[in-house]
Image (spheres, grey):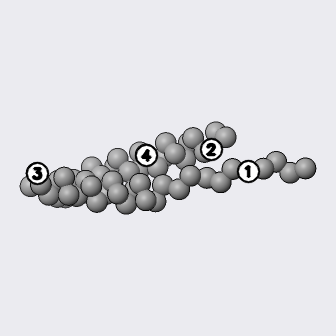
Amino acid sequence: MTKARKEPTGAGAILALTILGGTIVGGLMGQPSAGLLAGTALGIVIALLLWLRDWRK
């Protein structure tokens, strides 16, 4: 029998939401570009953590 493989967790929505959230929060603080970069960095970190979790299984 073949081993059942679990479907990987998608992180696209999380990445998009952190980018948008960072831009909004940065805009409220007067620094939308910095918020965009911070949101992108946070989203990449979360996506990498999800990928590592799926990779170990």
Find numbered disc 1 in the image and state the secondary structure of the residue it sits on.
loop
The disc placed on residue 5 is 1
User: How far, Cα to Cα, is label 4 from label 2?
Assistant: 14 Å
For badge 4, the amino acid type reads Ile
For badge 3, the amino acid type reads Met
Residue 35 image offset from top left, x and y in percent:
21, 53
Residue 48 image offset from top left, x and y in percent:
48, 46
Whether residue 34 is visible, yes or no, is no
Name the N-terminal-most of marks 1 and 4: 1
Q: Are marks 1 and 3 in contact (CB under 8 Å)?
A: no
Name the N-terminal-most of marks 4 and 2: 4
Name the N-terminal-most of marks 1 and 3: 1
| Mark 3: few/some/many CA within 10 Å (<14, 14-19, 20+) | few
Residue furthest to the right? 1
The disc placed on residue 48 is none
For badge 1, the amino acid type reads Arg
Side (left or right) of 4 relative to 20: right
| Mark 4: few/some/many CA within 10 Å (<14, 14-19, 20+) | some
User: How far, Cα to Cα, is label 1 from label 3?
Assistant: 45 Å
User: How far, Cα to Cα, is label 3 from label 2?
Assistant: 37 Å
Residue depth check, mark 1 versus mark 2: number of the one nearer the observer = 1
Residue 37 image offset from top left, x and y in percent:
27, 54
User: How far, Cα to Cα, is label 3 from label 4?
Assistant: 23 Å
| Mark 2: few/some/many CA within 10 Å (<14, 14-19, 20+) | few
Q: What residue did someone put label 4 on?
A: 46
Find numbered disc 3 in the image and state the secondary structure of the residue it sits on.
loop
Q: What residue did someone put label 3 on?
A: 29
User: How far, Cα to Cα, is label 1 from label 2?
Assistant: 11 Å
Q: Do the residues labelled 3 and 4 touch (CB within 8 Å)?
A: no
**Quarter placement of the C terminus:** top right
Residue 38 image offset from top left, x and y in percent:
27, 49
